[in-house]
Image (spheres, coloured by chain):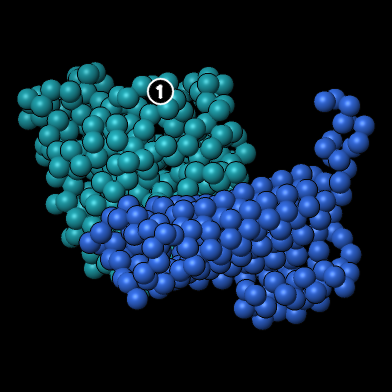
Chain colours: A cyan, B blue
């Protein structure tokens, strides 16, 4: 089953309240996905020549200070860090590639959940309300956020199999549905150099988009190609640095509803996830068309 | 008039109260406030009552309806009026997929657009949509009428039996064994009556009729010997 929710702010009116507005949306989709939950929030952007990483270590007592110090020495640059439960957000005054290779060398057991200039991905196994409270979602600020509540079908209930999946710098994907050609596609993508952590079908969709974008596709082109190459059922929401995109497969049996006001665009698997949003009574509410993608981005 | 506020009472409370009208009709007019996308609102009614839902409804609203007159002043989610037997269901906004699925009777009016699979396997209901309908609508439709004042999506009327389909706008594609048919006087009269019943101001002469070519397996008498 699974639930998807997304909230994109068109202006800065609600930026300080983004997490507070989003938390009930995520929790309301618990009956569609009670086994894991996660979200990708965009905000607090780093400057040029900096990279922002979200890192996870299974041990809550893990010393992020030591990691940051060692990284700083190894890379010879400034590293800022902030811990949130067993996850830390690092801001490093270098490029993504150097940061990744230094981390892989020094701390191969630390998982990179996201990389970019604005994105932070937080996800865990458990009830959505527990995950929201663990990471203090309601206190978070930003410009847009997408989230997922999971009811696993195609692979195990693990943190690695939960959504959102990072698909590149400042990009991520959440998926409701099931893909039927993910095994063959995974093999093809592996040959193209894309790496996978799990047997999860949604990770293949994420890997596919990463591959297309690496090949030089724009997001629009990558989504057009995804419609041709992915077989199965899907409603996707894709987070980008400046906004989000929503796409349903041609069969469109996985639900999706969109709502738009002067201040925001919201997406959810079911309308009941949107009812706590301000002004929803007068919002334009509609169902996205099959095999069609919708993109909102701040200019 | 009785008002049920779903912010204060559960859908189960509402449906229980509405079901009790079957044997003990004390209130004919019901208003439901704060539906907030809840599923299964006003399901399984069997009484000559009116129910006005003020706001958007979730899945399966007005399912299995008998006799009741249910109006949603907003959108409805998947499977609105599914398996309806009689009565009238009116959606002032849009309906999601599988509106009127398998419904046996009554009238379903959607004043906005309907999503995919509208009237799938319909068995006698009349459906009037003022806007457009999505793909695979009326798939295996057996009986009743589907009227679309806007456009129809892909594969309209695939594997159709005896439903009369009337579309004013364009049809993206017809499904297997569905063909355009001549609008004879009895069809114009039927469509006129349906539009009037639905309160939709359209000229029946602007519509085209679609129906089954009756060429699939089930229609071949030679296949009867298989049983």
Query: Residue B220: horizontal and vertical position, in percent?
Result: 89, 37
Quadrant (top left, top right, bottom left, bottom right) of the N terminus of chain A: top left
Q: Chain of mark 1?
A: A
> Residue sitting at 39 percent across and 52 percent down?
B39
Is B108 placed left or right of A82 in the picture?
right
Question: Can residue A195 be seen in this snapshot?
Answer: no
> Residue sitting at 49 percent across and 67 percent down?
B48
Front residue of this view, candidates A150 and B127: B127
Local secondary structure at mark 1: loop
Front residue of this view, candidates A10 and A34: A34
> Residue sitting at 40 percent across and 57 percent down?
B19
Front residue of this view, candidates A274 and B54: B54
Count of labels in the image = 1
Front residue of this view, candidates A113 and A283: A283
Residue A80: quarter of image: top left
Query: Residue A70: horizontal and vertical position, in percent?
Result: 12, 25
Is A117 placed left or right of B158 in the picture?
left
Question: Can residue B140 be seen in this snapshot?
Answer: yes
Query: Residue B90: horizontal and vertical position, in percent?
Result: 53, 68
Q: Residue A128, relative to residue B118: is it above or below?
A: above
């Amino acid at each position: 089953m699974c639930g998807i929710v997304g909230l994109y702010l068109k202006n800065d009116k609600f930026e300080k309240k983004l997490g507070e507005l989003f938390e009930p949306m995520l929790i309301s989709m618990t009956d569609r996905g009670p086994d894991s939950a996660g979200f990708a929030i965009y905000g607090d952007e780093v400057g040029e020549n900096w990279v922002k990483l979200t890192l996870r270590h299974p041990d809550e007592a893990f010393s992020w200070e030591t990691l940051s110090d060692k990284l700083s020495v190894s890379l010879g640059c400034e590293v800022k860090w902030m811990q949130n439960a067993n996850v830390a957000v690092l801001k490093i005054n270098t490029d993504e590639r150097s940061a990744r290779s230094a981390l892989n060398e020094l701390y191969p057991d630390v998982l990179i959940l996201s990389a970019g200039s604005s994105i932070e991905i937080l996800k865990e196994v458990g009830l959505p309300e527990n995950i929201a409270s663990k990471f203090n979602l309601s206190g978070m600020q930003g410009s847009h956020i997408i989230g997922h509540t999971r009811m696993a079908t195609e692979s195990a209930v693990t943190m690695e199999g939960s959504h959102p999946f990072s698909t590149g710098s400042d990009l991520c994907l959440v998926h409701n549905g099931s893909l039927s050609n993910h095994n063959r596609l995974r093999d093809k993508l592996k040959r193209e150099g894309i790496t996978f952590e799990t047997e999860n079908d949604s990770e293949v969709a994420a890997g596919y988009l990463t591959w297309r974008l690496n090949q030089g596709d724009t997001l629009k082109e990558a989504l057009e190609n995804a419609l041709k190459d992915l077989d199965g059922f899907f409603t996707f929401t894709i987070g980008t640095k400046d906004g989000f995109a929503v796409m349903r497969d041609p069969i469109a049996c996985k639900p999706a509803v969109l709502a738009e006001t002067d201040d925001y665009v919201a997406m959810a698997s079911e309308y009941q996830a949107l009812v706590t949003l301000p002004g929803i009574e007068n919002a334009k509410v509609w169902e996205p068309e099959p095999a069609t993608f919708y993109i909102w981005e701040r200019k | 008039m009785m008002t049920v506020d779903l912010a204060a009472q559960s859908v189960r409370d509402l449906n229980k109260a509405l079901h009790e009208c079957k044997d003990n009709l004390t209130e004919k007019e019901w208003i439901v406030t704060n539906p907030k996308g809840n599923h299964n609102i006003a399901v399984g009614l069997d009484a000559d009552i009116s129910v006005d839902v003020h706001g958007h409804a979730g899945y399966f609203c007005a399912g299995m309806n008998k006799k009741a007159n249910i109006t949603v002043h907003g959108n409805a989610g998947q499977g609105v009026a599914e398996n309806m037997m009689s009565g009238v269901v009116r959606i002032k906004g849009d309906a999601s997929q599988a509106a009127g699925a398998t419904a046996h009777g009554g009238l379903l009016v959607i004043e906005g657009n309907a999503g995919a699979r509208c009237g799938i396997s319909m068995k006698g209901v009349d459906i009037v949509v003022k806007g457009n309908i999505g793909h695979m609508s009326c798939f295996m439709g057996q009986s009743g009428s589907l009227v679309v004042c806007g456009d129809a999506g892909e594969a309209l009327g695939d594997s159709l039996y005896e439903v009369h389909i009337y579309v004013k706008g364009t049809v993206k594609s017809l499904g297997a064994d569905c063909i355009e048919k001549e609008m004879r006087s009895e069809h114009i009269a039927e469509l006129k009556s349906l539009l009037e019943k639905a309160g939709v101001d359209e000229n029946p002469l602007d519509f085209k009729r679609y129906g089954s070519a009756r060429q699939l397996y089930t229609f071949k008498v030679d296949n009867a010997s298989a049983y």
